[in-house]
């Protein structure tokens, strides 16, 4: 809880930790006028468990990331009362969970599955409050790709933009030209469903509009 002196000080606000090293998630929060006080990415094994579906995987990983970051933050005087926000994005195509492509063969396999087909993107957002309550939201977006020509396929692989991206593509980049139809949240496909993330923070008392008066 804030002290009376902190409440009377208009420059005071609670701390926020983003449990991610993703520049895309950081940029989306900044777009909403929210600047995390620290980035505490968690290194977790993202291999699906036996029988685990895409929704369950996204939920489990986002919670693990949040819990790891929370343990680190609670051991710090500066961040011990911080909100912790995490997210994990999973792409499902043809009944298969696609990897975060790290090598060209993985990216090529993803593109072959995505070309000319619809797929689903799930992001689970997890918030740990200063009182260690856990709040979660799962968001689904449906995306359809055009059928990729050989030239598009080869040039996208050569671009390297796919590296480290769930499903082997970045919708906010060159791959945006492949999208024929999108139903749901665009920011979800980028990696952080902004409406849901901000609603979670707002609902738990974080001042999401703290900087808006100075935005212009």
Image (spheres, rainbow, N blue to C red):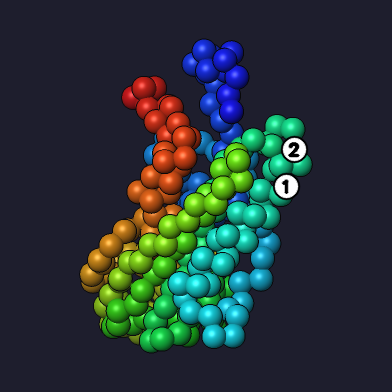
Residue 58 visible: yes
Circle 2 packing at 10 Å, graded few (<14), some (14-19), many (20+), is: few
Q: Is residue 194 above or below residue 158?
A: above
| Left or right of 130, for residue 93 | left
In the image, 83 versus 184, the foreground residue is 83
Quarter the C terminus occupies: top left
- Give the x, y percent position of residue 184: 28, 62
In the image, 68 versus 104, the foreground residue is 68
**In the picture, residue 143 is in which quadrant?**
bottom left
Circle 1 packing at 10 Å, graded few (<14), some (14-19), many (20+), is: few
Q: Is residue 76 above or below residue 100?
A: above
Image point 47% across, 76% down: which residue? 54
Q: CA distance from mark 1 to mark 2?
A: 7 Å
Dot 2 falls on a residue whose secondary structure is loop
Marks counted in the figure total 2
- Give the x, y percent position of residue 115: 33, 82
Dot 1 falls on a residue whose secondary structure is helix
The residue beneath circle 2 is 76
Quarter the N terminus occupies: top right
* Image marks 1 and 2: residues in contact by CB distance under 8 Å: yes
- Give the x, y percent position of residue 53: 48, 79
The residue beneath circle 1 is 72
Q: Is residue 214 above or below residue 75?
A: above
In the image, 95 versus 66, the foreground residue is 66
* Badge number at residue 43: none
Image point 49% across, 16% down: which residue? 10
Residue 173 visible: no
**In the picture, residue 103 is in which quadrant?**
bottom right
Q: Is residue 134 above or below residue 2?
A: below
- Give the x, y percent position of residue 146: 26, 78
Image point 36% across, 22% down: which residue? 213
Image point 66% across, 48% down: which residue? 70
């Amino acid at each position: 809880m804030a002290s009376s002196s902190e409440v009377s000080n208009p420059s005071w606000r609670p701390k926020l930790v983003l449990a991610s090293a993703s520049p895309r998630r950081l940029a989306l929060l900044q777009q909403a006028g929210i600047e995390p006080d620290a980035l505490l990415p968690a290194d977790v094994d993202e291999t699906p468990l036996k029988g685990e579906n895409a929704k369950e995987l996204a939920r489990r990983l986002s919670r693990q990331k949040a819990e790891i970051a929370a343990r680190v933050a609670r051991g710090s005087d500066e961040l011990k009362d911080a909100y912790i926000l995490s997210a994990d994005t999973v792409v499902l195509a043809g009944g298969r969970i696609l990897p975060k492509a790290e090598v060209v063969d993985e990216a090529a396999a993803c593109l072959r599955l995505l070309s000319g087909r619809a797929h689903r993107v799930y992001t689970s957002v997890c918030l740990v409050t200063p009182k260690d309550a856990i709040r979660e939201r799962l968001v689904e977006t449906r995306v359809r790709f055009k059928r990729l020509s050989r030239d598009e396929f080869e040039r996208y692989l050569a671009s390297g933009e796919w590296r480290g991206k769930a499903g082997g593509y970045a919708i906010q980049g060159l791959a945006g030209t492949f999208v024929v139809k999108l139903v749901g949240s665009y920011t979800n496909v980028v990696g952080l469903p902004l409406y849901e993330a901000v609603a979670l923070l707002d609902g738990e008392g974080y001042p999401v509009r703290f900087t808006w008066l100075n935005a212009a």
